[in-house]
Image: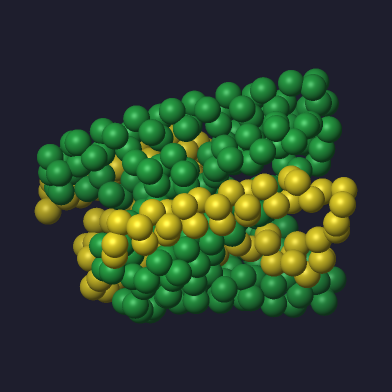
Amino acid sequence: MAMSSILFAGSAQFVVTQLFATGTPGLVIVLTAAVVNLRHMLYSASVAPYLRRLGPAWKGLLAYLLTDEAYAVGIIRYRRGPENGHGHWHLLGAGLALWTTWQLSTAAGIFLGSQVPASWSLDFTLALTFIALVVPALEDRPDVVAALAAGGVALLAADWPYKTGLLAAALTGIVAGLYAARWAAGHPDRRKATNKTPPERP
Amino acid sequence: MSRTALWLTIVGMGLVTYAIRLSVIALLGRVELPPNFQRALRFVPPAVLSAIIFPEILRPGGTFYFSPANPRLIAGLIAGLVAWRTKNVLLTIAAGMVALWILQAIR
């Protein structure tokens, strides 16, 4: 419950809960959470221009609420049309709705978690949610290369201690994506191909 | 882990996560991010999300399960197709869960 209100980051909470259970040193846990949440820096960079004129209190509050889902909902609204000056209220609303649901669900999970039969396979919703987020985000070949490289390494390294496999996989994916992008950029005739590729399934 | 260490770890994670989310929002206009860093950031979401998805589907419970009989693999593929076609999160989750339940029921 403390994690839900302080961290407010589903994927990181999911990963570190397993780490706590296996007695991982605190520093490794913090490092893992940092890498898992590094993608939020992208969201931060992406919404920053729209929040530029807001005061520090607004910026501070919206940053706390900036999750995958709030970002996805908020940025669509910002990109849809000319800014009417109320976009930050929309982002705040999305963030608060998510936050409230998140806290209530965590409480429900603590009290009911042990009573949900394993056969319902509710843990699978995590993978499904991320599939729903990642597939539309695969816009060109370098994205797909990054996803496949990270996924492959993650599979092989899944039994590394303290989930270090996840760190290795994420870094491999990022480097692979950078190389793929450079390879595509170096060949103008290939550049065309990078924009239109059916997203492959992770 | 002691109670204190547990709290320190949770608060540490909270601070780091908050710092990451606030970083560019707070700094924009004051500093420019290095272009290489910006290029790398682009690949963080597909890399991290895939690194979590792949083992959940192909190595459930720690053992490799590369087979068409793996219900999570088929359900994941169906969900991926729905996500690609509709870009709808709720529909993707619903399709994946229903597919998984059906596959588990007929096994």
Residue depicted at x 53% and y 61%: A34
Determine whether A200 is above or below A156 in the image: above
Which quadrant of the rendered structure holds the N terminus of chain A? top left
Q: Position of residue A64 (x, y in %)?
A: 58, 40
Q: Which residue is drawn at 46% across and 44% down?
A: A6
Tell me: residue A3, above or below residue A29: above
Q: From the viewer's perspective, is A191 left or right of A18?
A: right
Identify the residue shown where x is 63% and y is 52%.
B19
Outermost front residue: B4
What percent of the width, then of the height, locates residue B83?
48, 44
The yellow-coloured chain is labelled B
Tell me the quarter of the picture where residue A125 sits.
top left
Image coordinates for residue B78, horizontal then vertical, percent? 38, 49
- In this view of the protein, which residue sits in the foreground, A154 or B65? A154
Displayed quadrant of residue A199: bottom right
Relative vertical location of residue A89 with respect to residue B55 in this rendering, above or below: above
Asked whether the viewer can see residue A192, the reply is no
Q: Chain A's shade in the image?
A: green
Colouring mode (rainbow / by chain / secondary structure / one colour): by chain
Q: In this view, does A46 lie to the left or right of A37?
A: right
Q: Which residue is drawn at 70% across and 31% down?
A: A58
- Quarter of the image where one finds residue B2: bottom left
In this rendering, the answer to whether B93 lies above or below A130 is above
Residue A164: x and y, percent? 43, 75
Asked whether residue A63 appears in the rendered view, the answer is yes
